[in-house]
Amino acid sequence: MNHPNLLVELFVEELPPKALQKLGDAFATVLLEQLQAQGLTSAQSQLTAYASPRRLAAHITDVLPAAPDKAVSHKLMPVAVGLDASGQPTPALLKKLTALGVDASAVAQLKRVHDGKAEVLFFETTAKGAVLADGLQKALHEAIAKLPIPKVMRYQLQDGWSSVHFVRPAHGLVALHGAQVVSGVQALGLTAGNATHGHRFEATVDPVVIHSADSYAEQLREQGAVIASFAERRADIARQLQEAAARVGGGVRPIEDDALLDEVTALVERPNVLVCQFEKEFLDVPQECLILTMKANQKYFPLLNAEGKLTHQFLVVSNISPQDASAVIQGNERVVRPRLADAKFFFDQDRKKTLVSRVPLLDKVVYHNQLGTQGERVQRVRAIAQAIGHQLFDALTDHHGIQGTQDAEVVQDYLMTCIDNAALLAKTDLVTDMVGEFPELQGTMGAYYAVNDGLSDDVAFAIEDHYKPRFAGDDLPRHNVGLVVALADKLETLVGMFGIGNLPTGDRDPFALRRHALGVIRMLIEKEMPLQLDALLACAVPAFGDKIEDASAQLADFIYDRLAGTLREQGYSAQEVDAVIALRPQRLARVPKLIEAVRAFATLEEAPALAAANKRVTNILKKAGDVDPHVNESLLREPAEIDLHAALQRFVPEANAQFDAGDYTASLQTLAVLRAPVDAFFDDVMVNAEEMDLRLNRQGLLRLLHIAMNRVADLSRLAV
């Protein structure tokens, strides 16, 4: 038998739009959980959350009018403590029974149960199930108390004396079980009823009297002109945006921005999308500026053409639907015009000064009280970028050569000049009017101003890209100049903060050091940069002089921890990750191939035995101390050690050649044939022989085996 459904609504003043969806979900979820905990719901109960700018609500199906009675067993005390020698209750037992609301007459009803240690007294009773009014009161109190409220406000109730704390003043409370009001339920100075309010201007009835819990959403839509469901309202806005863009024609599309869509959904109760436009002359301003001001300040959806370029039209999500929308359209066009004019003014003013002329201004901008100004930081980034540039070109020259029609030295000189210029100018847009107004445009505006100053695309792109990646999944810098400056910028932050002991703790990471470390990892791996991690850290430390301590070892651990976490998120097992990270590979660009090779090796039939043997070898060598990886063939006595040495002589050169060629999977598969001679060695040979020369020779053989087996990864980490 299904029971009536429950509807609870809290009607409030306009809620914070960026928090609305989270507030709505939390309110409904906690309400359901609390009712479940009291036994007032069934296994079939379903939850629907509602959240609009002026309401939080929850609809829960199959809610019981009263929870069933529940048998409760109270563990009292050991029999030896509760009863005296004559079987009479002790004062301790009587006190316990009194606390439970019963007297000495209940002693005869007590049960004796052996709990494994002693015989214990239990008092069994039946607890009456909570009635809905009481249970809902408790659940509502918890749901309000546990709301993730960004900032609480205090306001007076209508009596003029009492005050409450909540995210916004509340003006109505609805609690319906089926068609019946759940009487006596109160919250925030309000008593539950069945009346709420719809749209401020377009409701056909006010107040809206809800007939039953199940008619809530439909009545609000039809009588109150409100789409109560956040998800439905969001989908309706998305549909209207696409339809409006289609009406404009020309292949235009609204900009995709889920955060903006969520925020607008939280600002309107019944959306109506309108097409507006601005003067085309504003399109001379970089589109990032116009898009940002329209999105951030006005919550508009700019329209882009098929090439992704901004058009002079945009979409507004209005909260009213007049028959003649011209006044609404003109009002929005009038409001956006000063915003765009400000952006144009900032852009025109900023271009009157070159980026180079702004460099001295950075000396007046404090970066960190222990690390100096932005001007000092720029000089450190320049020094680090120069060092990285030399490392990169040395590696490219050694391993790949520099391809091009010009002489390698000319190419290197040009790129090193670009790297230095980009590092010098990368932060100068911080002191421009545009970035002062819109900090989100740092880097982007620097690139525009670099082009305006006649600088090369390599420098302009590097200025824009040196902040990348800004977030998970963000694009990486496009070219080597940008990569070098981006690495230098992130390493300067990491080395500096670690050097002064300013490390992330728990959830606190004010300087985004975790994100910077992941950015370094992504650039080194995804761009396959032939750079050594320790060398990168070492080249950054001298740039700080005596401002910091050298914390390179601690920073390296931090980076490897982030790398390990990233690999686990990609689906690699903890053992596979540990096997690779244990060797602390210096060229992070090799890590994807290394871990794939380990995964492939782990599937081989020989893998478990070799991993276990490797662990055994590691332990033997650890106890032996410093062992020379050398074998005197004349001291090989046992057939098993002769066979193992022969196998190493035969297969290790092939495996090493495959390793050096970057085929790590083939290298490990080649070494898999060592399983049989390794097993035979441990079965038939006593490593710690009494004769010292035999012992050292056998330890040397194991050292050779250990070196050969662990070039790709520490295979002992795969042992179960």
Image: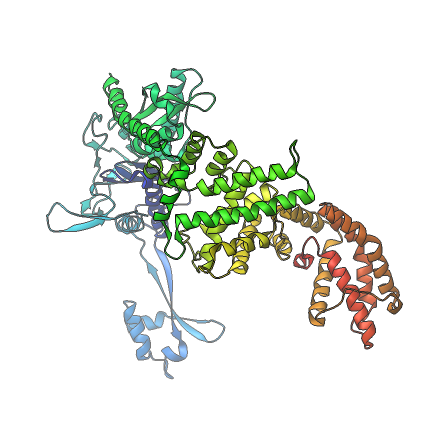
| Image quadrant in which the C terminus is located | bottom right
The colour style of the image is: rainbow
| Left or right of residue 449, residue 603 in this image | right
All told, the count of numbered labels is 0
Asked if residue 283 is positioned above or below residue 409 in the image, the reply reads: above
Front-lying residue, 439 or 140: 439
**In front of the other: 579 or 198:** 579
Q: Is residue 501 visible?
A: yes
Question: Which residue is rendered at x = 31% and y = 29% of the image?
Answer: 345
In this image, 32 relative to 225: left or right? right
Residue 601, given in percent of the width and then of the height, sits at 71, 50
Q: Is residue 472 visible?
A: no
Which residue corresponds to the image point at 42% horizontal and 36% vertical from the top-left?
A: 446
Q: Position of residue 469 (x, y in %)?
A: 49, 41
Q: Horizontal and vertical percent for residue 719? A: 68, 59
Q: Quadrant of residue 404?
A: top right
